[in-house]
Structures are given as structure tokens and as C-alpha cells.
Amino acid sequence: MATEREMSMSFGRAADLYEQGRPDYPPEAVAWMLEPVRRPGHAVRAADVGAGTGKLTRALVDAGAETVAVDPDAAMLATLRANVAGVPTFVGTAERLPLPDAALDAVVLGQAWHWVDHAAASGEVGRVLRAGGVLGTVWNIRDASVPWIVRLTEIMHGSNAERMMRAGDPPLSSPFAGWESRTWTWARPVDRAVLTAMVHSRSYLITAGDAERARVDAEIADLFDEIGAVGEALVALPYVTKAFRVLRP
């Protein structure tokens, strides 16, 4: 099995599948993360860290934020630039941000905080945020109250994000303390191709051997047949979006 480092750096090998298979973020979740730093006549200056193909970047731009995107994988950033015009991109990590001190109103991470060194990332985010700026983290998690979702997760294995969510609030270090949180439930209409891309965009599958990938493909094919995800037929893929925010002192 791949190491956590190998898994965290694997997504560029499946950037197109990630873009196709992963859901966007609910606009209300993004608005809630930015709410503490909005003020009349001021455009929020934000960084999307662990930006990937730009799922959260797009939502930040749509919310009116002046946005830069940071990711450790140049292949993911290339896909982001193809899908989100005009956003500056930088290779970097939450632990080493290529951004100046106190330059930002908001730093947000989508599907990413579970990959970082929380103490180092907290300190580095604290460096680039102005006093009163906000750190926001958000995850789209498949809704495990739905039986076929439980079966899907068993087939393709759970993720680090799901394990973190079960353990409680995400870890956090100085200069931050005390997350606020909100949850939204919703569903994404998807067909079989999108469902398959979602499965194949996960780090466990990207780094798996041929035999394991073949097993997963066979089992998800049976499951998708059972739930009616055949051809272009749409099924509802249920999600729980969990967002967290905390202000820099």
C-alpha cells in the first residue's frame, strides 16, 4: 500500500478524473467561511490552498473574492488554469506558502486539511493572514446514512478525510483556537461515468495495483447496476458538506 505522502501527491496523475468526478462546493458553505471578513467596499483577498483542479477556487471567484491558488502538484494547477481563467497559481503547500506576510483576508482549504501537518500549517496560515483574517476548511463527504453509499465506501475504502470527520473537529494549532462549524446536506445528480470517475479520482485507487483496481471496478460495476446508474441515467449522489472557520487573533 502507498504511503500517505505518496497518496497525497498522486492526484495529478488523475487530474481530469478529479475534475469530472469530484463535486463542487455549495455556494452557501463558501459564503459562510468568508462571512467574517466581508465588509462594504472591500474585495476579500483569499488563497485556495490545496486548490487541485479549482473546485473551491471557482466558488471563491464566484463569491467575489480576489483569489490565488496554491497546490503542490503542477499537473493539478495546469488543469485549474484550463478551467478557471485569470487566477494566479503557485506551487506550494500549507506548510510553506509562497505568499507574503499578513497579505490575505482568508485562507481556505477544500478536501485538503487532512493531508497537512496541522501545527506547521496553522503557523504558516497565521503568517499570511492579517489579524482578524479567517482560516476556512471544507469537505464534501458522501452521506453514510444512505445504505448504497456505505457499500460503495466499503468497496473502495474510506479516506483520511472521512476518518478525520469521525474523530471530531479537525486538528488545529497556534495561533488559532476554537473552530466554528456548519453542515449542509444535498445531492448531486450523476451518471455512471461521473460515479466511476469519482471512484478513480481517489488516492487509494490512483496508487493501487492492477489487481486491486480490477476488484474495485468489478464490484462498483455491480453496485451501479443495482442502483440504476446505467448508461446516461442519473442517480442522486448524497453529500454532507462540513465547513469550519476560525479567526486569526
Image (cartoon, grey):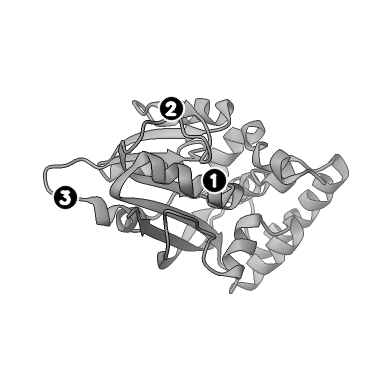
Identified by mark 2, the residue type is: Thr
Label 1 vs 3, first from the N-terminus: 3
Q: Residue at x 60, y 69 (%)?
A: 166
Q: Is residue 38 above or below residue 11?
A: below
Provide the secondary structure element on which disc 3 rests: loop
Q: Where is residue 32 in the image (x, y as percent from the top left)?
A: 31, 58
Q: Say which mark, if any, is on residue 89.
A: 2
Residue 57 appears in the picture as rendered: no
Q: Is residue 121 left or right of residue 229?
A: left
Residue placed farthest to the right in the image? 211
Q: Which amino acid does label 1 sit on?
A: Ala
Q: Residue 148 appears in which quarter of the rendering?
A: bottom right
**Would residue 91 be found to the left or right of residue 148 on screen?**
left
Q: Identify the residue shown where x is 26% and y is 56%.
A: 35
Residue 160 as seen in the image, left or right of residue 124: right
193 or 231, which is in the foreground?
193
Q: How crowded is mark 2: few (under 14 residues within 10 Å), some or many (20 or more)?
A: some
Q: What residue type is labelled 3?
A: Arg
Mark with earlier residue (2, 1) = 2
Using the image as rendered, state which of residue 172 and residue 187 is in the foreground.
172
Residue at left offset 63%, top offset 37%: 11
Q: Which residue, given by chain and number where applicable, does mark 3 sit on? A: 39
Please tell me in which quadrant of the rendered image residue 76 appears. Answer: top right
Q: Of the numbered discs in the image, which one, if any, rests on residue 120?
A: 1
Badge 2 vs badge 3, beta-carbon distance below 8 Å: no
Q: Are marks 1 and 3 in contact (CB under 8 Å)?
A: no
